[in-house]
Image (cartoon, grey):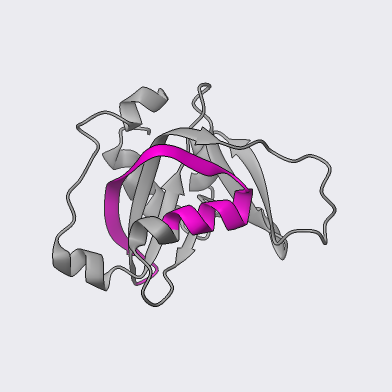
């Protein structure tokens, strides 16, 4: 997978006002130069890897939600534009996936099990489609739309 493919003009979607107001969760898909996706595992389930994201707070925009969740779960920050690339339901919740062409951050390797709530790692797309993945169906539709699989 080439990250430039994900950042292409063909990937960007437009969100209607209704979608913006009814979407309750946001993800931020970060892909490195090797085509690996930034994943996070929760401390309570290290085998359940997912794209960083989560629920939107009251009054928070979807973009701000995606950026906040990325920072909370990985300590990474997007650099430059953050664009929406996919919208669909994930476990009954309208969810928007964003991406950023550039990012700043580094995987920390010296963290203890109890120092953070999630563990970031770089993974191949296939990892997000395993049966253990909580959002496997959403990821499958996302990757299909982006022609990752």
- The x, y position of residue 105, in whole percent, is 61, 37
Image coords of residue 7 (percent x, y): 32, 31
Question: Which quarter of the picture shows residue 124?
Answer: top right
Q: Farthest bottom residue?
A: 58
Q: Nearer the viewer, residue 104 or 87?
A: 104
User: Magenta includes 20?
Assistant: no
Q: Which quadrant is home to the C terminus?
A: top left
Residue 26's x, y, as percent? 39, 59
Q: For the N terminus, which image quadrant?
A: top left
Q: Depth check: give the residue in front, 62 or 142.
A: 62
Residue located at (20% from left, 45% from top)? 13
For residue 82, above or below residue 5: below
Number of numbered discs = 0
Q: Residue at x 44, y 48 (%)?
A: 28
* Direction from residue 8 to residue 18 in the image, left or right: left
Q: Is residue 86 visible?
A: yes
Residue at (41%, 58%) from the top-left corner? 64
Q: Which residues are magenta?
A: 66-92
At which x and y percent is residue 92?
Answer: 35, 72
Image vertical order of residue 130 relative to residue 45, above or below: above
Q: Is residue 148 left or right of residue 35?
A: left
Above or below residue 57? Residue 140 is above
Task: Tell me the residue at 72%/61% (across/down).
Answer: 43
In which image quadrant can residue 85 be found? top left
Residue 49 in sight: no
Query: Is residue 75 rendered magenta in the image?
Result: yes
């Amino acid at each position: 997978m080439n990250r430039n493919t994900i950042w292409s003009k063909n990937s960007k979607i437009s969100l209607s006002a209704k979608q913006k107001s009814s979407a309750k969760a946001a993800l931020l898909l970060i892909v490195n130069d090797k085509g690996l996706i930034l994943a996070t595992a929760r401390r309570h389930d290290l085998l359940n890897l997912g794209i960083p994201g989560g629920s939107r707070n009251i009054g928070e925009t979807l973009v701000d939600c995606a950026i906040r969740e990325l920072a909370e779960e990985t300590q990474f920050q997007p650099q430059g534009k953050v664009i929406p690339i996919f919208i669909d339901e994930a476990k009954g919740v309208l969810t928007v996936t964003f991406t950023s062409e550039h990012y700043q951050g580094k995987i920390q390797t010296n963290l203890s099990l109890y120092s953070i709530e999630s563990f970031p790692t770089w993974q191949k797309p296939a990892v997000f489609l395993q049966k253990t993945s909580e959002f496997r169906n959403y990821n499958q539709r996302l990757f299909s739309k982006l022609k990752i699989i």
